[in-house]
Image: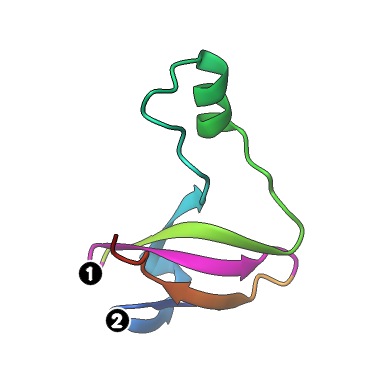
Amino acid sequence: MILLTCPNCGQRNVSEFRFGGETVQRPSPTETTRATWAEYLYMRKNVLGVQSEWWYHGACGCWFIAERHTKTQEILETYFLPEK
């Protein structure tokens, strides 16, 4: 059983969560080239090692970041994005 720690609810079974993909830098709102937006939407790095990912917890309705090692599947840290 894989456990994931929700920053609101604590440790839960991963089946309660939905994977949202890698965190990637969003292009500038003024960027209009199709190539830039296609890369943002579809290209993923799939690194071997620590990767930053979006996760959603349906029980509390929150999105958060998880730092996960892609080889061992170990969840190193979970957190909310800091407020701007």
Left or right: 51, with 31 as reference point: right
Q: Where are the magenta residues, as a range?
A: 59-71
Compute the Cα span from label 2 to label 1: 8 Å
Identity of the residue drawn at 52% across and 58% down: 53
Please state which of residues 33 and 54 is positioned toward the viewer in this rendering: 33
Question: Label 1 amino acid?
Answer: Cys
Above/below status of 62 relative to 37:
below
Residue indicated by mark 1: 60
Horizontal and vertical percent for residue 43?
Answer: 62, 34
Say which quarter of the image contains residue 64. bottom left
Residue pointed to by mark 2: 9
- The residue positioned 60% from the left and 68% from the top of the image is 68
Q: The N terminus appears in which quarter of the rendering? A: bottom right
Which residue sits furthest left?
60
Mark 2: few, some, or many residues within 10 Å (few <14, many ≥20)?
Answer: few
User: What is the chief secondary structure element of the magenta stretch?
Assistant: strand
Residue 7 % position (x, y):
35, 78
User: At 42% from the left edge and 32% from the top edge, which residue is drawn?
Assistant: 28
| 34 falls in the magenta region | no
Question: Badge 1 local density, few (<14 within 10 Å), some, or many (20+)?
Answer: few
Q: Secondary structure at mark 1?
A: loop
Quadrant in the rendering for residue 58? bottom left
Horizontal side of residue 30 vs 3, given as left or right: left
Left of 15 or right of it: where is 46?
A: right
- On screen, residue 10 above or below 80: below
Which dot marks residue 80? Answer: none
Per the image, is 68 magenta?
yes
Cβ–Cβ below 8 Å for labels 2 and 1? yes
Residue type, numbered disc 2: Cys
Q: Where residue 51 sits: x, y (%)? A: 63, 60
